[in-house]
Amino acid sequence: MSNAKDTWAAKGYIDEPIPQGIDLKAEIRRLCAEKKAVIMAHYYTEGEIQDVADFVGDSLALAQWAEKTDAEIIVMCGVHFMGETNKILCPNKKILLPDLNASCSLAESCPATDFAAFTAAHPDHKVISYVNTSAAVKAHTDVVVTSSNAKEIVESFPADQPLIFGPDRNLGGYINAVTGRNMLLWNGACHVHERFSVEKLVALKAEYPGAKVLVHPECKGAIVKLADKVGSTAALLKYATESEADTFLVVTESGILHEMQRQSPDKHFIPVPPEDAACACNECNFMRLITLKKLYLTLVHEWPEVHVDQDVIAAARRPIDEMLRISKELGL
Ligand code: 13P
Ligand code: SF4
């Protein structure tokens, strides 16, 4: 077994055969009940992962939900920084992530030591970090935001307070535009949201003239300008559900279409393609590492586990708590 564990550790996930003929979804639910475990999933994961989860949400809702659950184990079906956020909020729970390779290009674009040097060079600035960062970056932050609350949290600072925003230059630029602030921006981006094609979106708008354009603010400014609604995955979902329109061009990771279609089965959701591919969908390769098989094996073996150093937990907890406190105050 120790050889098997060394192989898993090298791979970052459990690679062993599963019993033949097994009903994976039923077994996953049985293991959750047996082990007092819950499954949390982001909207960008595969539809079958969302279907088996206890809770599906955007980054803010996942953090709010983690804080409340009394489960002993949380299996985070999402990316590594989401597992870290859960560990920071619930240090006494076991936080499992079915594949430790599920990283995030945006979080990777902001190494903690470089970010610490950047913030140290601007000691008069308050530091706002997007939740898509490592725990170590959050430890150098005054308040964390998600795309659901970034505008409101930025506006909660006095207008003359100098601010740093990291790591997403697109979200930061969008928030600067809508708030009239002039935050210093870290030069990072998400490789999924940056690759949407303006030309393909314009062509789809011409093909579907009545369609509403739903855009995540991690996209480039030229895409955001074409939007009817800009918002987090949860905000785009709410808009689509409440809108009287029946056709939507969706400019974010295509996993969200699963829940959009489930909530509005009679509406028509069209994923906008990336510029560099012939395929129709823009998928996050990191989110898609989470499969039903890995989820099942993770529950069986209670591994891989997300660990965060105690001192980092202590330093990163405060800016996350601050985000949750302000969001609660604002009813978000
Ligand atoms: P939200 O869940 O806040 O919409 O963020 C999208 C994202 O890229 C998560 O990685
Ligand atoms: Fe990170 Fe982009 Fe994937 Fe979200 S979609 S997890 S920001 S790489």
Image (cartoon, grey):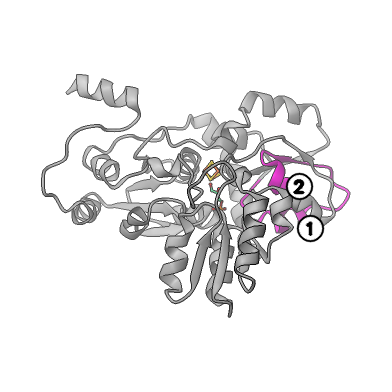
82 shown above or below 101: below
Q: Is residue 158 magenta?
A: yes
Please tell me which residue is depicted at 42% across the width and 61% down the height of the picture.
258
Alpha carbon of mark 2 to alpha carbon of mark 1: how far?
A: 9 Å
Residue type at the position of mark 2: Gly
Crowd band around label 1 with a 10 angstrom C-alpha radius: few (<14), some (14–19), many (20+): few
Please tell me which residue is depicted at 23% across the width and 37% down the height of the picture.
301
User: Any mark on residue 173, and which?
Assistant: 2
- Viewport quadrant of the C terminus: bottom right
Under circle 1, the secondary element is helix
306 shown above or below 246: above
Boundaries of the magenta span: 144-172
Classify residue 151 by image quadrant.
Answer: bottom right
Under circle 2, the secondary element is helix
- Viewport quadrant of the N terminus: top left
Crowd band around label 2 with a 10 angstrom C-alpha radius: few (<14), some (14–19), many (20+): many
Of all residues, the one furthest to the left in this rendering is 20
Please tell me which residue is depicted at 43% across the width and 46% down the height of the picture.
78
Classify residue 291 by image quadrant.
Answer: top left
Location of mark 1 (residue): 178
Nearest the viewer among 94 and 52 is: 52
Of all residues, the one furthest to the bottom in this rendering is 244
Residue type at the position of mark 1: Val
Residue 9: give x, y in percent of width and height: 32, 24
Any part of residue 70 in sight: no
